[in-house]
Image (spheres, rainbow, N blue to C red):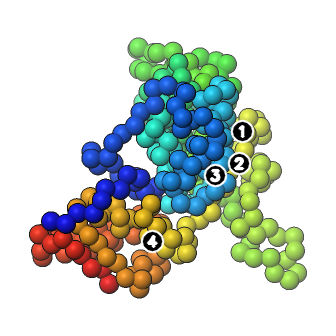
Amino acid sequence: MAMRSKIQNYQWWDDRNVPPTTPKIVVNSIDNDLFRTPKSIYDYFDANMQGCEEYKRKIAVAVWSAVNKRIRNHFLVIGESGCGKTEIFRILKRVYKNVVIFDSSNSNPKSYKGTNCLSDAFSDIDPTKPSFVIFDEFDKCLSKGNDGDLGYMMQIECLKFLEADEPIYGGSERNPRRIDISQSSLFFVGAFSALKKNRKSCLGFGNSIAVSKDEPITFDDVIKSGTLTNEFVGRLQSVIQLPAMNNERAMQIIRDPRYSPVGKLSNQYGIRIDISDEKVIELASDVEKYGIRQVYSKLNEIISDSLFDDPDTSIININ
């Protein structure tokens, strides 16, 4: 059976487990060449993630500052599903293990009964080294049950994390464990769609005061929307807004061997996969609605059908 050469860089859009054949690199020392400069970290991100240049640059500087200068950095990261806002941290975790991606969508304040609290995000960090804690789907926990008081309480709890001047306790109520988060950089990630609900699609004649939905979201926008309090926003270094996935970017990803789902599936199945330009355009047509992961799903379905008919094939043509 013919087999294409192994692809070492797995694509940013795929959040599935990396196959065991892929070498896993774990950084045990902060003097690794990869972390020597912000540019070297950016180059690593760029080799594994298409687009989002400003995002890669800012996160590269934040990582470098934390690892080399012990500076904590906190960001609000805004972007629609499938744009890469969380994937950059999965890419980072491949080479630096002290990264936690915590699903905060169903979290409650620590004072509420239950086990899923925001402080649980720190349970698995190594407090002796700089850590990066990502509160994924953070906007969902703020609006949970449409309870404004609950969202406010969540932010009050987060203030303790941002300041890191009060003890954080993990583990069970019977066996609490004090956790040092003084070296933890925090990233609050979500779609925050409410921030754009009053914006217009364009700036037309007679509508000069309106703000386009494509304009960058600022600290003032966040505060005026009532999504986050002044106290919370005032402790963040920056608001980062990622561009939404579109057809053009999707086609670039599919065609680029560094990121292409075609290359990944070819490597996984050990077969050659040829895809026509017409099919690339077709696959990219729905990304604005479903994200780039849908491309992977559609390709996988086509390949599965082909392998069912001929499991010994070495080439699959997708037209």
Q: Nearer the viewer, mark 3 or mark 2?
A: 3
Nearer to us of marks 4 and 1 is 4
Q: Which residue is mark 3?
A: 55
**Labels 2 & 1 near each other (Cβ < 8 A):** yes
The residue labelled by disc 4 is 255
Q: Position of residue 46 (x, y in %)?
A: 55, 53
Tell me the quarter of the image containing the N terminus: bottom left
Q: Which residue is the site of mark 2?
A: 239
Residue 277 relative to residue 184: left or right:
left
Of mark 1 and mark 3, the one earlier in the sequence is 3
Real-space Cα distance between discs 2 and 4? Answer: 31 Å
Dot 3, how many residues are within 10 Å of its Cα: few (below 14), some (14-19), or many (20+)? some
Q: CA distance from mark 4 to mark 1?
A: 37 Å
Q: Is residue 206 left or right of residue 307?
A: right
Q: Are marks 4 and 3 in contact (CB under 8 Å)?
A: no
The answer to whether the residues at label 2 and label 4 have Cβ atoms under 8 Å apart is: no
Q: Amino acid at mark 2?
A: Val
Whole-percent x and y of residue 262? 35, 68
Q: Residues within 10 Å of mark 4 (few under 14, many from 20)?
A: some
> Whole-Å distance between the Cαs marked 4 and 3?
22 Å
Secondary structure of residue under mark 3:
helix
Instruction: Tell me which label, 4 or 1, sits earlier in the chain.
Output: 1
Judged from the image, the secondary structure of the residue bearing numbered disc 1 is: loop
Quadrant occupied by the C terminus: bottom left
Look at mark 1 in the image and give the residue it sits on: 236
Instruction: Give SS at disc 2.
Output: strand
Instruction: Kindly identify the residue that appears in the image at 45 percent across and 26 percent down.
Output: 28
